[in-house]
């Protein structure tokens, strides 16, 4: 199975320090939905691993989160793409759960659900925690310079980023890179 794991806020859609709390606030980044559709058409399955501490903070409820994802799925479908599954952590940072990135719990759930080894599976995110969590599960780290990653444009990658982290201008640039370098094929597991 050709699998790619994506962060949500700042990678697929615009992020906010005030949290994305409603479908109206959920706005895709330019080219992101088209990038996912291109990955799908090249045979890649895309799943999301996202911290959603706004749930634990009481800023929105599961119905609102589901409505945001329904909007995402509908907009993505209009581009000919799909997200196979959304995994999220509802906990706040002080709850000490294993599913909140940078912990690898969401990635372990993905591996279990899909019955795959995550070694070499690309993980794409806009922040350190996304890549630390993916790397802890054996994923190949890719930083997009959107969302929180925009602060690193033109700068060397800080040393705390996992070894081998590749940077891409945005999700579209990552999709181009993956499709070109993997020739539509997955690395052997």
Image: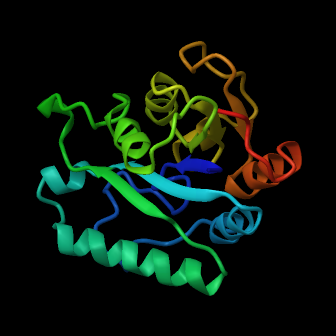
* Image quadrant containing the C terminus: top right
Up the image or down, 50 lies above or below 21; here it is above
Towards the viewer: 72 or 23? 72
63 lies above or below 108: below
Q: Nearer the viewer, residue 140 or 8?
A: 140
Residue visible at 46% across and 23% down? 136
Q: How many marks?
A: 0
Q: Is 149 situated above or below 180?
A: above
Location of residue 26 by image quarter: bottom left
| Residue at position x 39%, y 59% in the image | 86
| Colouring | rainbow
Q: Compare residues 163 and 152 and report the one nearer the observer.
A: 163
Q: Residue furthest top?
A: 159
The residue under the point 58% across, 29% down is 119
Give how far across and how far down residue 12 sits, in percent. Answer: 55, 60
Q: Is residue 133 left or right of residue 151?
A: left
Q: Residue at x 74, y 49 (%)?
A: 174
> Left or right: where does residue 146 sit relative to residue 106?
right
- Residue 102: give x, y in percent of width and height: 38, 29
Question: Which image quadrant for residue 40?
Answer: bottom right
What percent of the width, then of the height, locates residue 27? 49, 72
Q: Is residue 22 above or below residue 138?
A: below
């Amino acid at each position: 199975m050709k699998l790619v794991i994506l962060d949500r806020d700042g990678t697929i859609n615009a992020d906010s320090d005030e949290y994305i709390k409603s479908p109206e606030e959920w706005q895709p980044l330019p080219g992101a939905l088209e990038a996912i559709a291109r990955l799908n058409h090249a045979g890649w399955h895309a799943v999301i691993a996202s911290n959603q501490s706004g749930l634990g903070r009481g800023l929105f409820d599961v119905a609102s989160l589901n409505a945001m994802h329904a909007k995402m799925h509908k907009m993505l479908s209009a581009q000919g793409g799909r997200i196979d599954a959304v995994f999220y952590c509802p906990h706040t940072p002080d709850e000490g759960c294993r599913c909140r990135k940078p912990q690898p719990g969401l990635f372990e759930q993905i591996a279990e659900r899909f019955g795959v080894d995550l070694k070499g599976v690309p993980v794409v995110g806009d922040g350190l925690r996304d890549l630390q969590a993916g790397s802890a599960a054996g994923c190949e780290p890719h930083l997009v310079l959107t969302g929180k990653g925009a602060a690193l444009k033109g700068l060397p990658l800080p040393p705390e980023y996992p070894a081998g982290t590749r940077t891409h201008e945005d999700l579209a640039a990552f999709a181009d890179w993956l499709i070109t370098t993997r020739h539509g094929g997955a690395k052997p597991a």
